[in-house]
Amino acid sequence: YQRRVRGIDLSNKYAENGIFHQIIDESQNLLKDVKNDQTIQRVRDRIEEFVNYFRKSDARGNTTIDWEVLSNIRSLILEFLIQRIKEVQVPKFEISDPDYDYLTIGDLQVSLASIVPEHIKIQSHNNLDFSVRDLKTCLLYTSDAADDLL
């Protein structure tokens, strides 16, 4: 509240100042140019297309997150990573000095199953920042229990 009052006070103080109006006009022009920029629009369109893969609409037209798709993607990515790191080929290396060869190891394969824990828990915390004016849907919820609230 105090910031809003301070903003109003500053706005009134500088309302007569021509530079203040120029700054406001230039800021509005900049925002308009960013909004109309074709590259930014293509990025927004691609992000929207990407996000559409992770949402679905119910019988009433309410948009929800498609948890099944997210779960399938997570499973596919984890399976892919596990297959990629199942066995790691260690390159040949040597430890020596000009007088003596101390150690030479080559053609070594390490099975990660023997050294990686059987269970790993990854916990993620996310911050979400979005403009309410740019939302395409009016309601997002994540479970059928939310139907009871409507």
Image (spheres, rainbow, N blue to C red):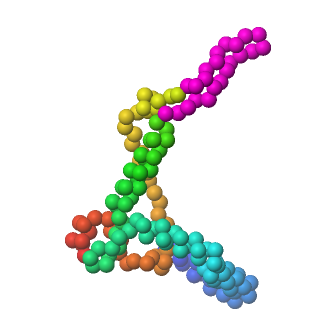
- Considering only vertical position in the picture, is 98 above or below 31? above
Residue 139 falls in image quadrant: bottom left
Residue for point 21% across, 71% down? 148
- Can residue 30 be found in the magenta stretch? no
Question: Quick one: 107 or 88, which is closer to the camera?
Answer: 107
Which span is picked out in magenta? 87-108
Q: Residue at x 53, y 74 (%)?
A: 45
Residue 7 image position (x, y, % from top left): 58, 78
Determine the residue located farthest toward the front in the rendered image: 107
| Of the pair 106 and 82, the residue shown nearer to us | 106
Q: Is residue 90 magenta?
A: yes
Q: Is residue 13 visible?
A: no
Which is more toward the observer, 6 or 74?
74
Residue 73 horizontal side relative to residue 8, left or right: left
The x, y position of residue 87, in whole percent, is 49, 33
Picture coordinates of residue 46, whole percent (x, y): 53, 70
